[in-house]
Image: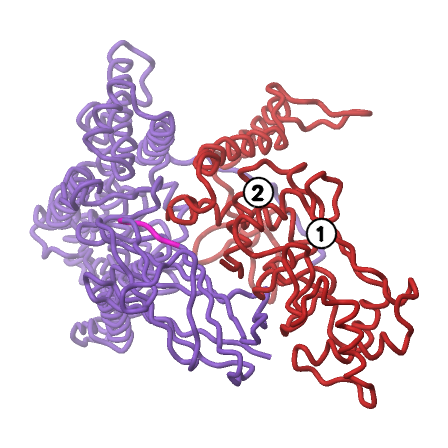
């Protein structure tokens, strides 16, 4: 450091560094020595850090440090500890039936929390983070269920899936009425308009709804019922509600009837343990399940 | 800037070794005051964790407890939950304002009397004095070669310091777990490792800060002296050397001579006692300065000397620079303790204090929070109604279970359903919340199929505690297409 002996600050009697800004000169105040020692101490600490923690990059790997510590193993340990704590709580779910879980406030709290987490991990990509669904994927909050909305029905659907690779899966196929030539394009048009009237929507103008009704009675009532309310045993949709999985406009409905949708869902029994599926059933049922 | 080549610059020191301060023993008004504050402060620190407070079964019986494991803070009749951290914010604001006010009135009284650094340094200096003797003895001892006597004194001093430091660091732990239990476990080596770790850390900091760092903490580490410099004004009472009375300083003999020649002589006899007793080693006669913690010990020292030489005391006193100038002009002393600044600080303290007191007195034992489900914002049900989801959380701060009833109003013709809350006899939804716990209750509010729903309607949730009748009201919104 350069000090100008000619410049001694009159008030403090201290020499200045000679650096001047607009007539103000910086006092040359030496740092305390212990401060310097602290700095040396941090250097020593840094060497210690090098030795104890992984810090040196090598050609294809890195120096693992004295105790082989990594954040990754720390996270793995934390996750394992979390899992162990979770298993303790989930133990109650294993023994109880779905009805018992819902009746017990403590088990219900655990099932809802666990179900919500499992839903986010496994179901949300198709059914939405809150179970609201999207075009082609059922809205689970609307109270409309293709395969039934009771706790047991939901558990069965999650476990075995829909049109999945599982011996007990839900199976049923709607014919592709247009593609397979069962109905002529004009007939499809007529039945589309009739189906719209079932839920109070307007038919296409100039289309013979009565003819549509006749086609419906001949081709659709076997599965969807005479009143169009569907049947949860065979997964046929209730056509009288405000909720449409694939949309209710003329184009969407025409496509549905002409080509059929027959969507699928995996059999989660092959991927998740029974307790998680129980929790999922309770959670999904809480979103808008029926009795 | 560029330096002219002909100018000669010399290399000054980059680092300076700390000059050791040997505060001399002193007795007087301010020393007595400092002892009183010290014993009160230490008394509170050590006794507080042992005060018991009955909160009923399954509740801690310690009056003041920071229960980190269960995230609760207890202070006598107050029990705070983590979401009530604003009380601490209020406390910090209050503390800052009180510091500002005390500073506007009496300068750095906090530094001089109540700061833990000052209290513990005082205690450590006293121990040092008892073992090694007063200022001169300590200076001599430092210069002495290592003799048996010196080794004994040094070992005794550091042992005593470490013991006090351990008691300080250990006592801090008493605020975080049940004190008597920890006391027993600590000495039977059954306490958790974290208790020993923190007691060790605080022992080390106490030992090094109060034993070795002392005034260096005030000079280099603490931000308050810098803030204080910005807060002080001409009317604040600071420890002041009465320059007008003391100068020109000279010995008693010289003063007699000067008077004989008709020359002025000040009251200061330049005995350096004020410097000798100073715990930070400053010369108060140089005026207000960073190193001065304004403990008033130099006032006691100077008063003793002035009494001895039969001159009026309080050559150094709590005074203002303004008064010094007034006396020079032959005017009377003027003390402006009540002035806009202090009134403003006092008003701010009163306001903050009242707000906190009000919040504390009207604090309820139950609480309701409502979170609107965002995905989906609303659902059209199969029947055609509009449904909104809300995640409610009931909090029960009592030590016994509470039964809550839920009332929902604002959107006509709705039904309220929940899988967690069950319908009561009167049709409202009800839920039981465990003692000292919260309960999450998902609730669905559904309109009838033919209801007209606007994009956003205010909706009111009221949780009524059956036992206390407390009502927690939260207003949210009901969304539609």
> Which of the chains bears the disc numbered 1?
B
Is residue B356 part of the magenta span, yes or no?
A: no
* Left or right of A276, for residue B399: left
Question: Disc number at residue B6?
Answer: 1
Q: Who is closer to the viewer here, B421 or A97?
A: A97
User: Helix or strand or loop: what does disc 2 sit on?
Assistant: helix
In the image, is residue B190 above or below residue A180? above
Given residues B353 and B440, the one toward you in this image is B440
Q: Which chain is purple?
A: B
Measured as percent of width and height from the top left, residue A193 is found at: 77, 80
Quarter placement of the C terminus of chain B: bottom right
For mark 2, what is the residue? Answer: A277
Query: Callout 1 environment at 10 Å: few (<14), some (14 to 19), or many (20+)?
Result: few
Colour option used? by chain
Q: Which residue shows up at 51% across the image and 70% down it?
A: B388
Q: Secondary structure at mark 1?
A: loop
| As drawn, B99 above or below B65 | below
Q: Is residue B236 visible?
A: no
Please report the residue visible at 15 percent of the width from the left and 49 percent of the height from the top: B30
Palette colour of chain A: red
Q: Nearer the viewer, mark 1 or mark 2?
A: 2
In percent of width and height, residue B383 lies at: 56, 73
If the image is split into quadrants, where does the N terminus of chain B sit? bottom right
- List x then y, in percent, for residue B437: 32, 50
Against A139, residue A59 (above or below) is: above
* Span of residues in magenta: B435-439
Query: Is A150 placed above or below B126 here?
Result: below
Numbered disc total: 2
């Amino acid at each position: 450091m350069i000090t100008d002996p000619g410049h001694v600050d009159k008030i403090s009697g201290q020499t200045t560094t000679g650096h001047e800004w607009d007539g103000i000169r910086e006092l040359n105040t030496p740092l305390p020595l212990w401060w310097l020692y602290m700095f040396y101490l941090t250097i020593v600490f840094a060497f210690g850090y090098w030795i104890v923690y992984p810090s040196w990059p090598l050609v294809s790997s890195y120096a693992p440090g004295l105790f082989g510590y990594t954040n990754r193993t720390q996270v793995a340990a934390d996750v394992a500890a979390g899992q162990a704590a979770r298993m303790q709580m989930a133990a109650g779910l294993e023994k109880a039936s779905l009805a018992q879980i819902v009746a017990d406030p403590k088990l219900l709290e655990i099932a809802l929390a666990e179900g919500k987490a499992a839903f986010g991990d496994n179901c949300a990509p198709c059914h939405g983070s809150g179970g609201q669904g999207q075009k082609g994927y059922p809205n689970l909050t609307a109270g409309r269920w293709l395969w039934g909305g009771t706790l047991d029905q939901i558990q069965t659907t999650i476990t075995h899936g829909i049109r999945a690779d599982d011996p007990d899966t839900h199976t049923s196929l709607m014919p592709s009425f247009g593609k397979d030539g069962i109905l002529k394009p004009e007939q499809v048009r007529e039945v589309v308009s009739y189906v719209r009237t079932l839920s109070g929507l307007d038919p296409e103008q100039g289309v013979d709804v009565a003819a549509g009704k006749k086609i419906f009675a001949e081709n659709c009532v076997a599965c969807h019922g005479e009143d169009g309310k569907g049947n949860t045993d065979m997964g046929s949709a209730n056509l009288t509600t405000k909720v449409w999985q694939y949309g209710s406009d003329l184009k969407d409905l025409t496509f549905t009837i002409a080509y059929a949708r027959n969507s699928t869902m995996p059999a989660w029994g092959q991927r998740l343990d029974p307790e998680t599926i129980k929790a999922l059933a309770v959670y999904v049922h809480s979103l808008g399940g029926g009795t | 800037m560029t330096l002219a080549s002909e100018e000669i610059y010399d290399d000054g020191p980059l680092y300076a070794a700390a000059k050791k301060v040997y505060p001399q023993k002193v007795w007087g008004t301010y020393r007595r005051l400092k002892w009183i504050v010290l014993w009160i402060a230490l008394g509170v620190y050590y006794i507080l964790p042992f005060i018991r407070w009955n909160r009923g079964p399954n509740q801690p019986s310690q009056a003041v407890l920071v229960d980190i494991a269960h995230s609760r803070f207890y202070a006598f009749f107050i029990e705070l939950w983590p979401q009530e951290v604003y009380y601490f914010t209020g406390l910090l604001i209050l503390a800052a304002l009180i510091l500002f006010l005390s500073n506007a009135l009496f300068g750095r009284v906090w530094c001089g009397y109540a700061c833990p650094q000052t209290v513990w340094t005082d205690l450590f200096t006293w121990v040092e004095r008892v073992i090694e003797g007063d200022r001169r003895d300590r200076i001599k001892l430092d210069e002495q070669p290592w003799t048996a006597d010196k080794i004994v004194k040094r070992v005794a001093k550091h042992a005593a310091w470490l013991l006090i430091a351990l008691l300080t660091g250990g006592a801090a732990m008493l605020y975080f777990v049940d004190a008597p239990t920890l006391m027993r476990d600590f000495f039977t080596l059954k306490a958790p490792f974290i208790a020993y770790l923190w007691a060790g850390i605080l022992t080390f900091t106490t030992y090094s800060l109060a034993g070795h760092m002392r005034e260096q903490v005030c000079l280099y580490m603490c931000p308050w002296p810098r803030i204080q410099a910005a807060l002080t004004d001409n009317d604040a009472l600071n420890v002041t050397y009465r320059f007008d009375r003391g100068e020109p300083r000279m010995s008693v003999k010289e003063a007699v001579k000067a008077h004989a020649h008709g020359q002025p002589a000040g009251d200061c006899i330049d005995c350096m006692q004020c410097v000798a007793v100073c715990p930070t080693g400053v010369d108060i006669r140089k005026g207000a300065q960073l190193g001065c913690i304004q403990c008033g010990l130099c006032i006691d020292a100077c008063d003793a000397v002035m009494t001895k030489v039969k001159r009026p005391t309080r050559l150094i006193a709590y005074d203002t620079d303004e008064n010094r100038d007034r006396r020079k002009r032959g005017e009377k002393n003027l003390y402006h303790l009540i002035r806009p600044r202090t009134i403003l600080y006092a008003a701010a303290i009163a306001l903050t204090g009242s707000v906190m007191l009000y919040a504390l007195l009207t604090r309820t034992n139950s609480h309701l929070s409502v979170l609107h489900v965002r995905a989906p914002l609303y659902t059209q049900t199969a029947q055609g109604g509009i449904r909104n989801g809300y995640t409610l959380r009931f909090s029960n701060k009592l030590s016994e279970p509470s039964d809550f009833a839920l009332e929902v109003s604002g959107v006509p013709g709705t039904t309220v359903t929940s899988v967690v809350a069950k319908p009561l006899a009167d049709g409202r939804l009800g839920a039981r919340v465990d003692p000292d716990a919260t309960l999450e209750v998902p609730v669905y509010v559904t309109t009838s199929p033919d209801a007209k729903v606007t994009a956003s309607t205010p909706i009111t949730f009221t949780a009524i505690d059956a036992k206390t009748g407390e009502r927690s009201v939260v207003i949210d919104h009901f969304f539609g297409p």
